[in-house]
Amino acid sequence: MQDKTLTIREMCEAFGVTPRTLRFYEAKELLFPERIGQKRLFTRSDRARLKLILRGKRFGFSLEEIRQLLDLYHVGDQQQTQFARAYDVAKDRLSDMEAQRDELSEAIDDLKSQMKWGEKILASMSSPKKAAE
């Protein structure tokens, strides 16, 4: 499969995406499959780009950030610029994710506290009924 081109169906199966996703990435100029009539053939380069696109999306990178990073591949400095920029974007994204995690942890703790308070209220409301029985 190294140098073999893949059809859209094969790409979908290999990466767990839909044809619509592949066409969308092509329309956004993130993928550049070879076109033979209506048929799209994805090269090894397309597979590598899709892997990076999906990884970037998983980490919360925007499509524009992903495009910029992918475009840096051809700068001609053995990918030093691409790696440095990817590292900076990843560092910023990690900081955002950690802040979101902290906010979420705080919200979870607050909700648990409110639920405990609610349990006490419910217990006190049902206690007189049990005593009357």
Image (spheres, rainbow, N blue to C red):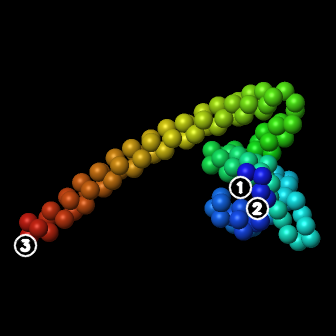
Q: Earlier in the sequence, mark 2 or mark 1?
A: 1
Residue 91 placed where, x, y %? 65, 31
Q: Amino acid at mark 1?
A: Met
**Crowd band around label 1 with a 10 angstrom C-alpha radius: few (<14), some (14–19), many (20+):** few
Q: Residue at the location (85% across, 69% down)?
A: 39
**Which-is-in-front pick, marks 3 and 2?**
2
Between marks 2 and 1, how big is the CA–CA gap?
Answer: 8 Å
Q: Which residue is mark 1?
A: 1
Q: Secondary structure at mark 1?
A: loop
Q: Which residue is mark 2?
A: 6
Q: Residue at the location (71% across, 55% down)?
A: 1
**Crowd band around label 2 with a 10 angstrom C-alpha radius: few (<14), some (14–19), many (20+):** some
Q: Which residue is mark 3?
A: 133
Q: Earlier in the sequence, mark 1 or mark 3?
A: 1
**Crowd band around label 3 with a 10 angstrom C-alpha radius: few (<14), some (14–19), many (20+):** few
Between marks 3 and 2, how big is the CA–CA gap?
Answer: 74 Å
Quarter of the image with the C terminus is bottom left
Report if the CB atoms under discs 2 and 1 are less than 8 Å apart.
Answer: yes
Name the quadrant containing residue 72. Answer: top right
Residue 20 placed where, x, y %? 75, 67
Q: How many numbered tags mark residues here?
A: 3
Q: Residue at the location (14% across, 69% down)?
A: 129
Between marks 1 and 3, how big is the CA–CA gap?
Answer: 75 Å
Q: Is residue 80 visible?
A: yes
In the image, taking residue 70 as reference, residue 105 lies left or right, namely left
Q: Secondary structure at mark 2?
A: loop
Report if the CB atoms under discs 1 and 3 are less than 8 Å apart.
Answer: no
- Can you say whether 76 is above or below 17 in the image? above
